[in-house]
Amino acid sequence: MADNRLKLITVFVLLCGVIYAQGVIESSSAGGGGGAVAADITTGLVNHWPMEQDAGTTVTSTGSDEDTLTLVNTPTWTTGSAAVGTRFLDFDAASSEWAWADWTVPASTDDLTIAGWWKGTDGNGDIFFAVHGTSFSASPALAVQSFGSNWRVFIETVLQDSPRISLSVWNHVSITRENGVVTFYINGISVRGWAATGQDFGACFFLLAASAGSAGDDCDGGPANFFDGGIDDVRIYSRALTTTDLAALVAL
């Protein structure tokens, strides 16, 4: 009889251990175990142009600002081999194809992130995106450009060289500004950072696949440095994304 009681007690203790362990596992998987912070790609999303249409001359933003992206000279809606989803926009530099949005750019003290997928076919000074100041001068306040085998980043009209790029493949390219420091990322990896001097990036003038060609142009006129290749899933945030957030965008 004593042996049977000992066996029952042993089985009971083992079962309690299994139940406790299962509870710990479930708690950890639910985020209650004190592990790594989960990625957040929704908070602060002011503009998101997913490029999932099959036609049209505008792209509706799903972000909180809802700024429409206007397509100029008919870039091609392309199906297949997209970075995210099933479609992307293909821009032809020879046909001067580009896009713009009347986005209210944050003040110089505000944090932000601009991110998207880029597949360029050459490195002849193609502009991925450009943000122009209130005067819309020929030099952008912020821009990312391919030049030869390198990236070039304009910050407040100062040209900065960055690491090499791979052409004809999708690259996730992003810029963050946090506490006055601008950081450039390629495929979610920080490759260079600069201290900005606090220039206001402007009141509108967000250009995609081109930059301003001359001073005094409006949002919808006078572009140059046209991009040749594909662009997909462009996003603007009112905060600086973390490396965990950016890794989640790359993994979409």
Image (spheres, rainbow, N blue to C red):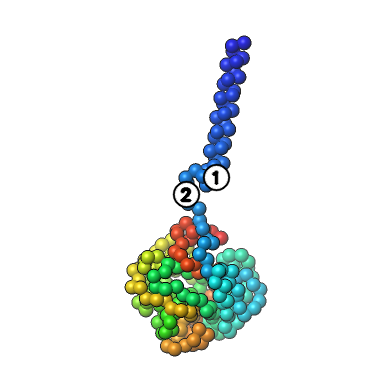
Q: Secondary structure at mark 2?
A: loop
- Quadrant position of the C terminus in the picture: bottom right
Q: Tag 1: Cα neighbours inside 10 Å, few (<14), some, or many (≥20)?
A: few
Where residue 152 appears, as percent x and y from the top left, is 40, 74
- Residue at 50% across, 84% down: 219
- Quadrant position of the N terminus in the picture: top right
Q: Amino acid at mark 1?
A: Ser
Could you say which is closer to the camera, residue 96 or residue 40? 40
User: Can residue 12 be seen in the rendering of this structure?
Assistant: yes
State the CA–CA distance, disc 2 to disc 1.
11 Å
- Residue at 56% across, 41% down: 26
Could you say which is closer to the camera, residue 56 or residue 186? 56
Above or below: residue 175 compared with residue 132: above
Above or below: residue 221 compared with residue 142: below
- The residue sitting at the right extreme is 54
Horizontal relation, residue 34 to residue 61: left or right? left
- The residue sitting at the top extreme is 1
- Residue at 34% across, 68% down: 195
Where residue 138 appears, as percent x and y from the top left, is 41, 85
Q: Are marks 2 and 1 in contact (CB under 8 Å)?
A: no
Residue of label 1: 29
* Quarter of the figure with residue 136: bottom left
* Quarter of the figure with residue 16: top right
Could you say which is closer to the camera, residue 197 or residue 84? 197
Where residue 75 appears, as percent x and y from the top left, is 59, 79
Where residue 131 appears, as percent x and y from the top left, is 45, 77
Q: Secondary structure at mark 1?
A: helix
Q: Which mark is residue 36?
A: 2
